């Protein structure tokens, strides 16, 4: 079956941006600024402004952003870090790579982000950080989470890997917790040509620590004040990101318009639960996820009709084999588990056409019936 609507289409986006991208490649090539350097510095200042943050630091990936942020907060063996189970594996991995233990809090059934009413009971004397995940393009309820964190003196690290430009009460993801971790993988709302990520922060000390950690612990050339890693951003990725950042606001607006059309066309379909936008949120629809009962069959049938959907995520982290040592069986986080069986991500990218969305909805309705 030929693909009638892909899940994501980067080709059209890149064709439109080709002259700007080619100019960026030329500039990087001519200056040979491949690792770190002026293109990274420029992107960092542009991206910090975009996120309403004081500083941004380019790193190699979203996973680097998360674990370097945790390391810079001093998270280590024996510590606990709280997050949600319906996220990409990397959120938990970053905690584990620091030697700490992930502790999960169930999600809210409407936003799919951390349920603040379940957070406090998960905090112990070992808790060193809380990572709310702004899933699908909508932020967690940050005032509620920050208030609990403040009562316990626990730092908050935003996982804003799916929320480029998302807002909470008018403030952007990445500036809502003191530290933000952003993945800039090519499929994201703002994506490099491969792997990249960024840490945002308000704190000069944290900035200095992450700056050293991403570059072998160097505080200055050949003076290694700590043991770090190579987690630098490439100049070529920064140049690509600067080009794409100029178009991000428009691209996010297109995603919102597509979400509105999906909402309208699905409004009369009782078998589909549409995404809920919290009153506090500007949702940027990295993913437009609906809930349906027989999700796996619907997914497969839609694929057979040439409409490619995806699932984020079919198995919550606490049920992954890699985390079986935590001893958390089925039933531990009921909302996340149920969502993992029902969530279906429909095609979403700025260049979607009205007729594509109409076709997706038509095929979805047909696949719900058969
Ligand atoms: C919520 C979330 N956290 C972390 C990551 C990890 O980012 P990366 O793949 O750049 O390491 C991702 C990547 O998709 C993500 O979606």
Image (cartoon, grey):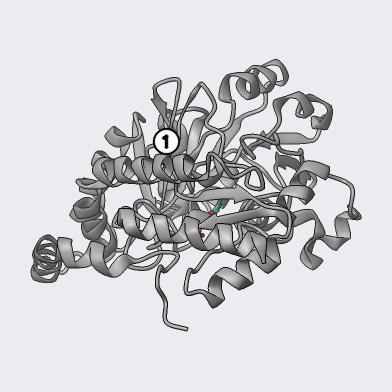
Secondary structure under tag 1 reads: loop
> Count the marks: how many?
1
- Residue shown at 40% from the left, 55% from the top: 358
Q: Which residue is under mark 1?
A: 166
- Residue 222 visible in the displayed image: no
- Residue 343 visible in the displayed image: yes
- Residue shown at 52% from the left, 45% from the top: 266
Q: Nearer the viewer, residue 145 or 356?
A: 356
- Residue shown at 45% from the left, 46% from the top: 262
Instruction: Check the picture and name the quadrant holding the C terminus.
Output: bottom right
Count residues near mark 1 (Cα–Cα under 10 Å), then give few for <14, some for 14-19, many for 20+.
many
User: Position of 328 compared to 93: left or right?
Assistant: right
Q: Is residue 370 above or below residue 266?
A: below
- Residue shown at 36% from the left, 60% from the top: 356
Q: Nearer the viewer, residue 351 or 247?
A: 351
Spot occupied by residue 141 in the image (x, y as percentages of width and height):
59, 26
User: Position of 76 compared to 234: left or right?
Assistant: right
């Amino acid at each position: 079956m030929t693909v009638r609507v892909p899940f994501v289409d980067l080709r059209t986006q890149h064709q439109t941006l080709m002259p700007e991208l080619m100019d960026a490649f030329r500039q990087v090539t001519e200056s040979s600024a491949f690792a770190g350097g002026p293109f990274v510095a420029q992107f960092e200042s542009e991206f910090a402004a975009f996120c309403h943050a004081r500083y941004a630091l380019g790193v190699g990936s979203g996973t680097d952003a998360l674990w370097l942020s945790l390391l810079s907060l001093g998270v280590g063996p024996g510590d606990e870090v709280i997050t949600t189970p319906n996220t990409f594996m990397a959120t938990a991995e970053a905690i584990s790579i620091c030697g700490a233990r992930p502790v999960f809090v169930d999600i809210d059934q409407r936003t799919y982000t951390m349920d603040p009413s379940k957070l406090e009971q998960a905090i112990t004397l070992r808790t060193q950080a809380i990572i709310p995940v702004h899933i699908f393009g909508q932020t967690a309820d940050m005032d509620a989470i920050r208030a609990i964190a403040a009562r316990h003196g626990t730092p908050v690290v935003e996982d804003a890997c799916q929320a480029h430009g998302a807002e909470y009460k008018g403030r952007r993801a990445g500036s809502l917790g003191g530290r933000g971790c952003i993945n800039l993988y090519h499929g994201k709302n703002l994506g490099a040509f491969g792997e990249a990520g960024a840490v945002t922060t308000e704190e000069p000390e944290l900035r200095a620590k992450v700056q050293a950690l991403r570059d072998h612990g160097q505080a200055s050339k050949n003076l290694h004040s700590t043991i770090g890693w190579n987690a630098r951003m490439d100049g070529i990725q920064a140049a690509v990101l600067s080009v794409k950042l100029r178009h991000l606001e428009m691209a996010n607006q297109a995603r919102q318009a597509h979400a509105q059309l999906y909402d309208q066309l699905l409004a009369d379909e009782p078998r589909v639960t549409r995404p809920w936008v919290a009153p506090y949120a500007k949702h940027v629809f990295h993913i437009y996820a609906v809930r349906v009962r027989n999700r796996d069959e619907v997914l497969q049938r839609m694929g057979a009709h040439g409409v490619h959907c995806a699932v984020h995520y079919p198995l919550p982290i606490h049920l992954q084999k890699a985390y079986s040592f935590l001893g958390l069986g089925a039933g531990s986080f009921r909302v996340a588990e149920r969502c993992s069986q029902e969530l279906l991500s429909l095609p979403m990218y700025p260049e979607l056409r009205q007729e594509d969305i109409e076709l997706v909805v038509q095929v979805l309705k047909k696949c719900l019936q058969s």
